[in-house]
Amino acid sequence: MAEFVTVPASALVPAAGLDPVFAAVLPDAGLVPYHSINAVKDTLRPGSTAVVIGMGGLGQFAVELLRALTSVRIIALDVKEAALAAVRHKVDYTFVSGSSNVSEQVMEAAGGYGADFVLDLVGSSATLQLAGAVVAPYGAIRVPGLSDGVFKFETSQLSTSLPWGASITRPYSGTYQDLHDLVALAQTGQININLVRYNFDEALRAFDDLEAGKINGRAVVVMD
């Protein structure tokens, strides 16, 4: 929050025409899901299924990106009904991830075969287990979530943690080219998420609201 900041010119991406408040969240909340989705774009063919776990700011971006870049069936999961309500009109199915039969619900919604792509933006042991339970054979799981989860990987022919051919990767952020491409997509007006704006003198309240789970989307402190 310095008054003046210098950075290498190579680190800057022009974002002409974008609301600075929206542009501010692209290098983090937008770039993380964009990188994971872009990495498996060959898997996201029309008629395939994508599952997104966690409907916070990154999850909302993931839904927007999947809608803008693919023709896949989208299934959104979250522990909170309010978070699901924010994206319900943009996805094909929503399920509460903490329910006892959520994996069966997802499998049925995915046509009984499983999800070709699972994006776990939570990364807890429970969500990792859920991702493994619903991914399709030769499907892809990407886990940017940082909730200290542990995933059991088995090599037995009777393995149940992952189906045959499925992959699991732990990506982080994205590339400069990803950010350039994401900004260009944003400039077309095809993606948007809920933004909660705070004035600079409300910055501490923004942190409190974030910790209390009151923010549906992404919080931005505006330094007027």
Image (spheres, helix red, strand yellow):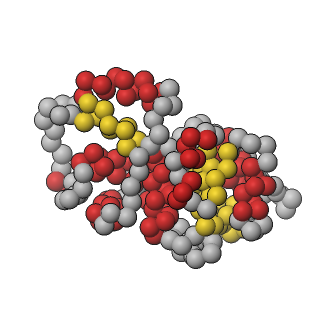
* Residue 127: quarter of image: top right
**Among all residues in the image, which is located at the extreme left?**
4
| Residue 197 position (above or below residue 170) | above
Q: Position of residue 165 (x, y in %)?
A: 71, 67
Q: How many marks?
A: 0
Could one spot residue 119 in this view of the protein? no
* Residue plotted at (55% across, 43% down): 83
Q: Nearer the viewer, residue 210 or 160?
A: 210
Q: Nearer the viewer, residue 117 or 156?
A: 117
| Residue 91 position (above or below residue 129) | below
Q: Position of residue 179 (x, y in %)?
A: 33, 59
Q: Quadrant of the N terminus?
A: top left
* Residue 182: quarter of image: bottom left
Left or right, 10 with respect to 185, comes to: left
**Among all residues in the image, which is located at the extreme right?**
158
* Residue plotted at (45% across, 54% down): 61
Left or right, 211 with respect to 128, comes to: left
* Residue plotted at (61% across, 39% down): 80
Q: Position of residue 216 (x, y in %)?
A: 47, 40
Q: Position of residue 66 (x, y in %)?
A: 50, 64
Q: Quadrant of the C terminus?
A: top left
Q: Nearer the viewer, residue 121 or 91?
A: 91
* Residue plotted at (78% across, 66% down): 112
Could one spot residue 20 in this view of the protein? yes
